[in-house]
Image (cartoon, helix red, strand yellow):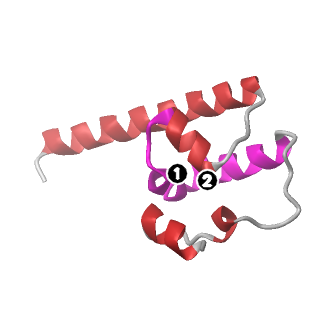
Amino acid sequence: MPQHLRDAAQRRHQQATERTTTALARLSAAGAAISFASVAREANVSTDFLYRHPQLRQRIQTMRTTNGRHRDTASAEDSAPVTGSAAVRALSAH
């Protein structure tokens, strides 16, 4: 892969990570429910992106339990595999 394509991919990744961090801060400040779906919508990224990045995934999981909305039972998001598409996870949840 040519260097300029690697650089462009790295920039897109960095921008998506920054949008996610900003989205988490906005949702938390607003007292909104934090979930993979809400963060993905707010950051304009896919849920796959969030699931595939362990630091973001861990941060979302931590924030959604400390944001005053602790869940006693595991949700479909908690049991979703790290790999696979959002469509597969959505269909598996039913």
| Residue at figure coordinates x 23%, y 37% from the top left | 8
> Residue 33, relative to residue 70: is it above or below?
above
Specify whether residue 61 is painted magenta: yes
Look at the image and say whether residue 52 sits in the magenta stretch: yes
Give the main secondary structure of the magenta stretch: helix
Disc 2 on helix, strand or loop?
helix
In terms of sequence position, does the residue under pointer 1 or pointer 2 come before the other? 1
- Which image quarter is the C terminus in? bottom right
What quarter of the picture does the N terminus occupy?
Answer: bottom left
Closest to the observer, 32 or 16: 32
Q: How crowded is mark 1: few (under 14 residues within 10 Å), some or many (20 or more)?
A: many
Secondary-structure class at tag 1: helix
Task: Name the amino acid type tagged 2.
Answer: Arg
Residue reaching furthest to the left: 2
Q: At 73% across and 24% down in the image, what residue appears?
A: 30
In the image, 38 versus 21, the foreground residue is 38
Left or right: where 79 falls relative to 5: right
Q: On the image, numbered disc 2 is attached to which residue? A: 57
Which percent across, then down, holds residue 25? 66, 28
The label number, if any, that marks residue 35 in the structure image: none
Identify the residue at image location x=66%, y=48%.
35
Mark 1 lies on residue? 50
Position in image of residue 93 (x %, y %): 60, 72
Q: Give the range drawn in magenta.
A: 43-66
Pointer 1 and pointer 2: residues touching (CB < 8 Å)?
A: yes
Give residue 74's position: percent from left, percent from top: 78, 67
- Identity of the amino acid at label 1? Leu
